[in-house]
Amino acid sequence: MCGIVGYIGEKRQAVDVILSGLKLLEYRGYDSAGIAVLDKGEIAIARRPGKLAALAAALHEKPLFGHLGIGHTRWATHGLPSEANAHPHASGGVVVVHNGIIENYVTLREELLAQGYKFSSQTDSEVIAHLIAREYKKIGNLLNAVQAAAKLLKGSYSIAVMAKEAPGELIVARNASPLVIGLGEGEALVASDIPALLDYTKEVVILEDGDIARLTATSLEVYAAGEPAKRPVQHISWTPLMAQKEGHRHFMHKEIFEQPRALTETLRGRLNANGYDIWLEDLPMSALNKENLTKVLFLACGTSYHAALLGKYLIKTWARIPVDAE
Ligand code: GLU
């Protein structure tokens, strides 16, 4: 899990709002970050693997200016954390950031490759950029293009989309991945979680699964199954710290209740749909097989030591080889 922040308005530089918002979403975990801004009629993109500070340093060296932008912190599920795999992904003047997993991306990728689209990453997300670009070319309306592309996607996603040819709008969509909209005066924001909005506005709209919305600096339209939908504007009286605790009295309490979601997010993309094949890209085990594995040693500290103790128990029981946790 990771974060999305988007900004449209005249008041502020999109980069400033997006970087500060992504910072407030850091607690969700991530391995790379990126940002796209409409800068003098062109879309400019900066992406970096690693911490947000690396992206901030790149933007300090080569600033991007503009009042429409989208940003992303990525938790890689398909493709290593690298600059090429970091979001936003672009296709024909359309840029997209995505949280989640597109389960049918292999089929979509093959179809798009056959139609001449070139891929520059190993992510599942890049298919979304190409699909929207393809539909946008046909339809000429970004909202309708996102609606058409969303019909082809299977899986979980929250996305934010902008296009060079559509400087006054930001399109967002949510399906089984969180997304909230913040309405300011003459500006609007979108983010994965409320804390990222609170420095700018207390008026928020929480999107529901299946919603697709069009934001301009002064308006919001939400659609569900292609029809206009009403979503209440909620006034948030929490301070940013209270919002981060999401109604829990302590962070520890919140973390305990977050465990089911954290486990799902961790295993997401690492278990095949059949639930039996396990894919650990960061731990290439192909050279090893059970016969030449004579002992496992976990080196860990703090919470990871407790996880190692559980690993020791499981591996000993199932693989029947000596295991130590130090
Ligand atoms: N599945 C996408 C990727 O690996 C998005 C991951 C995320 O939610 O950050 O790029």
Image: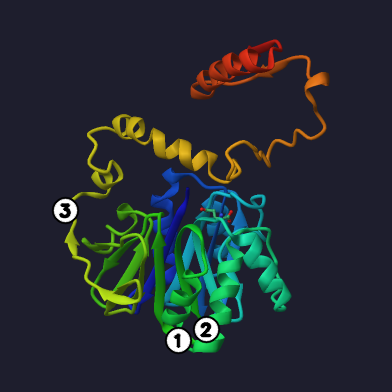
Is residue 81 shown above or below 214? above
Rendered residue at 43%/55% (across/down): 22
Rendered residue at 72%/78% (across/down): 116
> Viewer-proximal residue, 100 or 148?
148
Rendered residue at 37%/75% (across/down): 8
Q: Is residue 68 left or right of residue 300?
A: left
| 3 or 2: tag closer to the N-terminus | 2
Q: How many marks?
A: 3
Q: Is residue 158 left or right of residue 286?
A: left
Provide the residue designation for mark 2.
136
Q: Which mark is residue 237?
A: 3
The x and y percentages for residue 102 are 55, 58
The x and y percentages for residue 119 are 70, 68
Which residue occupies the extreme front position in the image?
274
Rendered residue at 47%/36% (across/down): 263
The amino acid marked with disc number 1 is Asn
